Amino acid sequence: MTNLKYKRILLKLSGEALGGENGYGINVSEVEAIAGRIKEVHAMGVEVAVVIGAGNIWRGKQGLDRGMDRATADYMGMLATMMNSLALMDALERLNVFTRVMSAIEMRAIAEPYIRRRAIRHLEKKRVVIFGAGTGNPFFSTDTAAALRATEIDADVVIKATKVDGVYDADPKKNLQAVKFDELTYIEVLNRRLQVMDSTAITHCMENKIPILVLNLWDQASLMSALNGEKVGTLVHS
């Protein structure tokens, strides 16, 4: 534990990560694979918190394009994050990793209400904590929720899990000449409009000096290497 670069991390997962190849629904095998990665990190002594998106179940844009009220669409997305959170909790507990789901919207039958000091206590007791329902407010993304929670729990880093090995100046799947960045400043991300996290989340991390590490979670070695201080993915910092 003492040699690890990051002792407490906030892992940001997209909802599509739980959906498998097609990115829709909840693919149990994919959830179990993610839980396995988290267990490996947790076993190293790292305190792990998680925020999951909802794009595999509901995308608010679908409703907005039909004239749906924005707040209603966002609340539906928050509920969808709870489904993903419960699925990941179940997969982790089947691997004997003690896990707590905390919701920004009170729903005591299935999750604890989010209380900052209680969340920190869970982490100190070596429980994985999954933060569901975003910030609990419409008009804010789960990226922003991840940045906010990372600040509140005093995380060392926000790890943005993707299926590519970092941030590129173009889509590497479409452009073979795309150049990967090893490091970026927050301002460079904002000025270049790079798709790391939304601008509100980037700005929040910049103001609170929380680094963002973008890496490929599906590369078995990348997360472990990052925790050991090796250069992996793309680091966004000041």
Image (cartoon, helix red, strand yellow):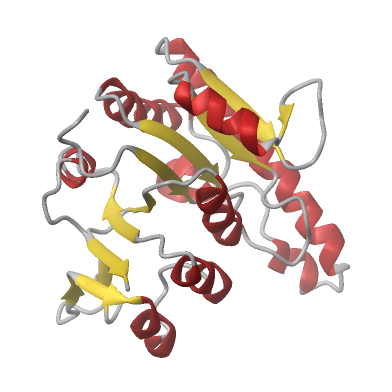
Residue 184: percent from the left, percent from the top? 27, 75
Residue 130: percent from the left, percent from the top? 56, 34
Q: Is residue 100 left or right of residue 33?
A: right
Residue at position x 34%, y 23% in the image = 39
Give the quadrant of residue 215: bottom left
Number of numbered discs: 0
Quadrant location of the C terminus in the rendered image: bottom left
Q: Is residue 24 above or below residue 27?
A: below
Give the quadrant of residue 65: bottom right
**Which of 117/212 is in front?**
117
Q: Which residue is the extreme one toward the bottom?
A: 191
Residue 88 at least partly seen: no
Quadrant location of the N terminus in the rendered image: top left
Residue 145: percent from the left, percent from the top? 60, 54
Q: Is residue 3 above or below residue 192?
A: above
Residue at position x 31%, y 31% in the image = 37
Residue 46 at least partly seen: yes
Residue at position x 49%, y 33% in the image = 27
Q: Is residue 224 left or right of residue 15?
A: left
**Which of 152/57 is in front?**
152
